[in-house]
Image (cartoon, grey):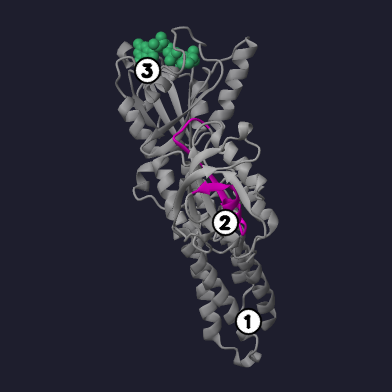
Amino acid sequence: MEISSDTIAAIATAPGEAGIAIVRISGPASLSIADRIFKGSGDPPSKRQAGTFLHGFIRSSSTPHDADADETILLIYRAPHSYTREDVIEIQGHGGRTCAKRILRAVLEAGARPAEPGEFTKRAFLNGRIDLLQAEAVADLIMARSDRAASAAIEQLEGSLSSSFSSIYDCMINAAADLEASLDFPEEDLPSSLIQGAVERLRSAKKQLDTLLATWEEGHLLREGALVVISGKPNVGKSTLLNSLLGTNRAIVTDEPGTTRDTIEEEFVLDGVSLRLVDTAGLRDSDNVVEREGVQRAHALINKADLNIMMYDAFVKPGTDELKQLMEMDPCRCIVVLNKTDLGQKTSSADFPGFTVISSSLLKGTGIAEIRAAIIAKLGIQGFDLPHATISERHRHIIQNVLAELNDTLKVFSPDNEDLLVPAISTLRTAIEQLGTITGKNYDELLLENIFRRFCIGK
Ligand SMILES: Nc1nc2c(ncn2[C@@H]2O[C@H](COP(=O)(O)OP(=O)(O)OP(=O)(O)O)[C@@H](O)[C@H]2O)c(=O)[nH]1
Ligand SMILES: [Mg+2]
């Protein structure tokens, strides 16, 4: 545990006009700083009990015209019963562009230093109140793009992932201890039950890690939002579909083929999951340099998409080139929309074997509900009925390494040959050390820097 000797401060609320703004102070000098700057009736903050809130004014030597910085409410938390487990003062002032800055200036003049991004949460981790998974959940919660993402982050904050990883960690530690104990036996007396038990524990750890690995896809959709790309030939109704899904006239729609040149991306929450919906330039050969660039961007997005919506004019039989491109796509990640059925229909699902096909007339408002339902079904969103914590890209990377090492351990492992036990244990120890970096049982400065730099200042 690292005890901080300095005291940090930051504005914890977003800038802009609002009812209140909060300045947070954490560290050993929090209360004495509060005494220096707070002007209220009765005893100074340092003589008050934890949980007290006081009304008063903040003095600042540098406020113009000798005026007080702001009228405030001051809250007192005493270590270890605070967010950081240190003494913490929170000062609630008026919102807006100026008051919080005036309060912060007073706090810094009184001896605090400006906090770095995520430093309050980093202290909560270093002081043992939360582990790294919970710290990451705080950032996920703040950045949640949808209700489901927020619920998943709350689950993680409450420790559901932490307990899964801790039980796998313990399982591996116990297996390593058993294997190490077996080294003390002479070869002919090697207790097979000890070794067999260790192997079973390792297999169980592998299984649990595989289960957690399977939550990555969902976690990726919740954290980053699913990239849903609408593409197809010019004039088939792509921009009309974007507008219909968003419920606004975001993209220009005309009857002129080649209207959309650049990509248009909008965020959109569907069934609690955030989507990054992109309208693209109609796919065709063009002499126009701007349109050509737009088509290139469309192709790049099609390759990156979590889900492609390929649109066709229902009245026009798709060409062989168009179908060839479609057949290279994964039907699980693609929806075919045959639009403008009000003009008549010459195509049907039989032209797109293996694909989910929806007929629509966006002009008449038909098919849109089916398209929404297909997006939800294809992204597997309806399977997320109960929001649960999901692993992130960082965790996935570590789990994959740990699984590789577990496989090596089990491969090398031979109960009949003590010589092979030693390298097996060493591989297992490496795996355990890596796994420990998920919860923060093991960490270094670089790991913490990478995690906390994505936080905002004041959290
Ligand atoms: N009849 C009919 N017209 C439609 C339908 N959906 C869209 N349109 C019309 O088709 C024309 C082209 O629509 P857009 O949404 O601009 O088509 P686009 O695919 O984005 O076209 P580009 O941006 O040029 O690639 C517009 O005049 C729309 O009003 C439909 O279901 N039926
Ligand atoms: Mg368009």
Q: Earlier in the sequence, mark 1 or mark 2?
A: 2
First to last magenta residue range: 16-40
The amino acid marked with disc number 3 is: Ala
Please give the name of the residue rendered at 52% of the width and 11% of the height, measured from the top-left corner: 258
- Left or right position of 340 against 400: left
3 vs 2, front mark: 2
1 vs 2, front mark: 2
Magenta stretch: includes residue 36: yes
Please tell me which residue lies in front, 166 or 66. 66
Residue 444 falls in image quadrant: bottom right
Q: Is residue 234 visible?
A: no
Q: Position of residue 77 (x, y in %)?
A: 50, 57
Please tell me which residue lies in front, 202 or 323. 202
Q: Residues within 10 Å of mark 2 (few under 14, many from 20)?
A: many
Q: Is residue 340 above or below residue 22?
A: above
- Left or right position of 344 against 256: left
Please give the name of the residue rendered at 52% of the width and 42% of the height, measured from the top-left corner: 57
Q: Secondary structure at mark 2?
A: helix
Residue at mark 1 = 180
Residue at mark 3 = 314
Q: Residues within 10 Å of mark 3 (few under 14, many from 20)?
A: many
Q: Earlier in the sequence, mark 3 or mark 2?
A: 2
Residue at mark 2 = 31
Disc 1 versus disc 3: distance between alpha carbons?
Answer: 69 Å
The amino acid marked with disc number 2 is: Leu
